[in-house]
Image (spheres, grey):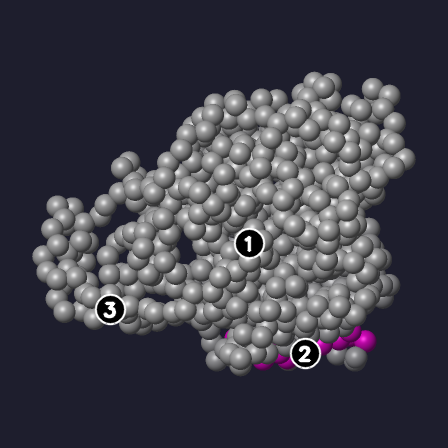
Amino acid sequence: MHPPRIPKGIDIALLPGDGIGPQLAVYAKQTLEVFQRYRPHVSFNVTELPFGGAALAAGESSALPLSTLNTCRQSDAVILCGCGDTNYDLEPEKALLALRKNLGVHVNVRPVSFPSDHLAQHSAYKSDIVQNLDIIFIRDLAGGIYYGRKKEADDGGEAYDTTEYSRQHIERLARWAGTYAMGFDPPKRVHSVDKFNVMATSRLWRSMVTRIFEAEFPAVPLDHVLVDTAAMILASDPTALNGIILTENMFGDILSDQAGAILRSQESLASASISALPRQDTQGSPGIFEPLNLKPRPKLQSPLCILESLKLMLDLSFGLVAESEAIARAVRRTMDPVELIGSDARTADFGGSTDVTQFMRFFLEHLEFYLEAINSIEMASQPTQHRSPHRQTAPIYYARYPMNLIEKIMTHAGVGLQKPNVRSGEMVCVKVDWTITSELLWAGMEKTYDLMGRPRPYRNDRLWLAVDHTVDPRTNDQPRQRGLIEKAEKFKYEAKIIDFLPANTSIMHTDFTRERAQPGRIVVGSDSHTCSAGSMGSFAIGFGAADVVMPMVTGETWFRVPEVCRINFVGTLPYGVGGKDVILHLLGLFKRNTIAFQRAVEYGGPGISELSMDARFAIANMTTEFGGMGACFEADMITAAWISHRENSEHRGGGLYFKPDDGAHYAEQRTVDLSEVGLTIALYPDPDNVVPVTTKSGMNLDGCFIGACTTTEEDLILAALVLEAGLRMGKIPVSTGKRRVTPGSLRIIKNLERHGLLNIYKQAGFNVGAPGCSYCVGINDVDVAGEGETWLSSQNRNFRNRMGKGSFGNVTCAAVVAASSFTMEVTDARPFLQMIDEGKLQKLIGDWKNELMVAPEIHEPSPEIDQGIAPAMLEDAAFVEKSTVWASNIVESNIQYFAENVDT
């Protein structure tokens, strides 16, 4: 928001006060000590001083001793933890007013928002009304001032006109709010609250605020709200006032107390009293940062109030916005439930049972990880010199030529390119945005990591490690599983991995794609189904485990620009047909390892607007079965809408929405009519031996499995409704056979549970598994198909021995598995689908396609060009190559052949 102050030492006056204040002071010092360790260039000099009732109890003659006041005047900020005790009447309150006056602070800033969006469900309001609450109150600290023409007496008893003073006061407050609002992108909306036409005060207020914003902050949205109207909005639709509420002292008190009640925890709020303008220099702006509710209490329920105070201090007094945000993110991760990768440490005021000491332990650990992320971001942003692998003999002039989507992504990510584009076959170095792996594959990666000396990862906030392949709650205590889990956990703490998913939280691809992957970015993973993230518009590629270590450590990797196969979708899918059916249709049409073999697959065309993000996920996921080495969908408004609703705000932005150029080159192009897609089965042991379900009706089954990463939330919902339809038809599951459903993540399980769908699975005879690869890889020692057993599964692969040694796996969509589970015979799902209420299905899967969606801004690559190439060369659209091209280095290697069905 403003230039950060990075001084040799920041002087902080810490006023513990009395009551719960000394305990808060301990937590303040613990937090600042973590900053000292992980951000050593930000040094805090903390001085504890007597104040309030504690000062009087210690024998001081005043609640604000002169020594305390003088030290506060010389300090860069004041942290007030406790104010007073009822035994001392109003002395501490007077001391606080005197402290504010002596430090010259005029503006009060009071944010009101949930420390975690998930906690909205604990509000007295419906969670969907308040979960995005984000209000900042900005008000004056001159209690009782009259904004208008009035005669008052000065200190000498002379009468003076208050009008000019009123004007100056309003100008100062409005200018502060405008400056603060402009620090956000886009600027925050300002709601100016008054009682217009009731008194001269309000008329002057409204006219002055309007004039200041029109003249100095035209880019800031401004509206005027009557105080009674504001109160009604807070009572009915509080997020309508998201932004900044600018008001005078009295109205600010009333409204901020009302807004604070929405949280059901006054102990989570803090207040800042600061000078006239947000800092614009490096001298610092003294401020007083305090918990909102300083009234004496016998016991501290939550440390949130002091953490919020520290957050405000770092931001408003020192411009340390990244550090301030680190506190906010650490608090959120502490309180978030396990399915959101949190510690689920909620204190009693938020409906939990975690005590204050435990809360701080979790918080400080998460804070360490987020501060390390700031360090890694700063190191990653330092300029580096890259030497070209070619020898330059003379300048070369290049023109821009049409590029496909994947070439654009690689061009934008290119390091030290010699020209502003790339073509298939070229060997280039690219910046990698994410590396992802699992506990099983990390065990292989670690061998390479050890040989490298275990260097610091490039970005600890761009590394995703999920414990998913070998784990199940029934066997996680076994030596093999325990060993793999412990290896992964050890690396979590060593590398301070922010996105570490404990055992059975999510399959590595599921939540990563849904909650992290971004359009236009490069994702490299140690698993062949990493291509799932291509559904979000990323270019997602699975590497060998050892090969993933290099981008994890350096943030870069070399690879050959692939040939690209383009699939253009047209038409509309029949009702009840989804992404799994589409990719099986592609495999049946074109066969495996043909047009997609060793190529990247780009998906687009007008038909993608008919595909939900879950449908795209299933298609991208099985691009590897198609033979592709990577996948990428054209990101569109449906992609943007999905990303905008992500749980964590930091993962809603940062995408690059590229489009292929007209005339772009493709190795192959095919058009696929979605209206021709039906329900099919890929027969053991080939993913491309695809036949209509009806041709195998009646085939006996020993097991039915719905799960694996390729089975999306949408598929699981549809399958549950198929089962519900069957139960309504009077179908009773036969007693023979095994039935298992394993959703891809805890988030999905919670959603299915919330809508009663897990109970439907149970009624239909399914056992519900914890998130993990389960039968799809058959290596967790319990979910393993028996020798000679025939299974119908919604997983992605049906290779030999995939589900278990000697078993026979056949792949289809979840709806067909559900329909077949009643009789344990392959059954056409269409009669069941016809019984499903379309309105109910639409409500459960969400309104992913509507008229309110906005088309995202389209980007063009902005490549990093080698400094030896003059900028003028890049703008010559009339391309002529004017000299000899550098001779490429020849790389020689042995070829290694793998068995037919080897995979990760």
For disc 3, the marked residue is: 390
Residue 669 left/right relative to 902:
left
Q: Is residue 455 visible?
A: yes
Across and down, in percent, residue 840 comes to 71, 24
Say what amino acid the circle numbered 3 marks. Answer: His
**Magenta segment, which residues?**
42-57
Q: Choose top left, top right, bottom left or bottom right for residue 216.
A: top left
Q: Looking at the picture, which amino acid does disc 2 mark?
A: Glu
Q: Which mark is residue 900?
A: 1
Label 1, residues with CA under 10 Å away: few <14, some 14-19, many ≥20: few
Badge 1 or badge 3: first in the primary sequence: 3
Residue sitting at 50 percent across and 39 percent down? 591
Q: Residue 452: x, y in percent?
A: 51, 79
> Where residue 149 sits: x, y (%)?
50, 41
Residue 139, magenta (yes or no): no
Quadrant hosting residue 64: bottom right
What is the number of the mark on residue 888?
Answer: none
Q: Which residue is mark 2?
A: 48
